[in-house]
Image: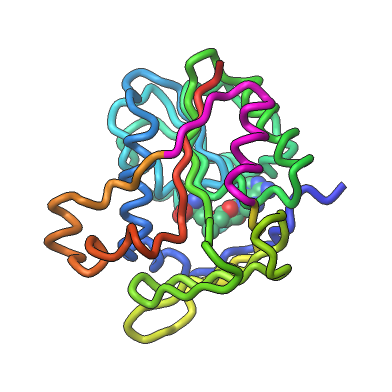
Amino acid sequence: MEKSNYAGQIGRTYARVNALPDKICARATMVKMLDPLRGTQVLELASGDGWFSDVILDAQHITCIDVDEYQLAQGRKKRSLVPRTFVQANMFDASLPHADRVLGPWIANYAPNEEEMSHFFARVGAVMPSGGIIGLVIDMPTSATIDRPLWGSRKTVQTGDMTTSGPMIVERYDPKTKEVLATIPTNYHPMGTIERVLEQVGFATSQVAPLVHTQYFRENHPKFAYSYEKERDLQFLRAVKR
Ligand SMILES: C[S@@+](CC[C@H](N)C(=O)[O-])C[C@H]1O[C@@H](n2cnc3c(N)ncnc32)[C@H](O)[C@@H]1O
């Protein structure tokens, strides 16, 4: 069964995407969604080099799972604030450790269809206690092709249809030079599909507003702070295990 259409490595220029304001905002919003983290066992899925969990200060332990050995090796080299283990596995069939909190940057988008998404979130839920939280960052363009030059994000839903799930190409590029930093084959799912799947496998979901109106963005990325909410191509979903 095709569990993911992700084919291989993200590429070495991907790390430069971390400097783009929407990604910084996504990480801050992720930490907000998972609050409180103190003393928890944390699982980061499709972690890459663990950039999202780099800023977690007071969990007990973090497990990062990714398929890409290059990204994992970069992660292992970092000095982390919390004991952290990097595991190479396909998250769609790996055995998962107990997790009070799950960082899920773009994980819903890697499921190729609703059935795989449902199996996947049921398996994630099976290692979580009641009250455990998944924080989801989701690629969610508002039309079949969108381009956001301010933060270098181009998304193309290949079916052209926003009412059904289908393959999507996400390109991240340098806003100044237009150099493409990563081309990511992934999938679009309507928000209602993701919410329904999570509810069916035992989670209560709520959409979360991004942490964009902060002094950091007003001072460092003022145009972004002003326009992001009107042009947003990401959604944030907090899923709490019942
Ligand atoms: C766009 S990158 C994001 C990496 C990291 N979350 C970040 O934001 O810096 C997507 C990551 O998902 C990983 N990935 C894709 N499909 C996966 C799967 N089935 N199991 C585990 N990792 C997967 C890729 O190897 C890649 O590192």
Indicate whether 99 appears above or below 25. Answer: above
Indicate whether 47 appears above or below 164. Answer: above
**Residue 230 sits in quarter:** bottom left
Q: Residue furthest bottom?
A: 177
Report the residue at 64% width, 52% height from top: 189
Q: Residue furthest top?
A: 130
Report the colour scheme.
rainbow
Left or right: 32 with respect to 179? left
Q: Nearer the viewer, residue 53 or 139?
A: 139
Report the residue at 58% width, 46% height from top: 191
**Residue 59 sits in quarter:** top left
Q: Position of residue 242 (x, y in %)?
A: 56, 16
Left or right: 116 with respect to 177? right
Q: Is residue 197 magenta?
A: yes
**Residue 209 sits in quarter:** top left
Q: Would residue 67 be seen by someone viewing this image from the given angle? A: no
Q: Which region is colored magenta? A: 190-207
Left or right: 82 with respect to 215? right
Q: Would residue 3 be seen by someone viewing this image from the given angle? A: yes
Q: Nearer the viewer, residue 87 or 44?
A: 44
Indicate whether 202 appears above or below 161. Answer: above
Report the residue at 12% width, 61% height from top: 219
Q: Position of residue 111 (x, y in %)?
A: 70, 48
State how many labels appear: 0
Q: Position of residue 221 (x, y in %)?
A: 21, 65
Q: Nearer the viewer, residue 54 or 113?
A: 113
Q: Is residue 236 magenta?
A: no
Report the residue at 40% width, 60% height from top: 232
Q: Position of residue 65 (x, y in %)?
A: 57, 41
Q: Residue furthest right?
A: 1
Q: Nearer the viewer, residue 201 or 10?
A: 201
Q: Residue furthest front?
A: 163
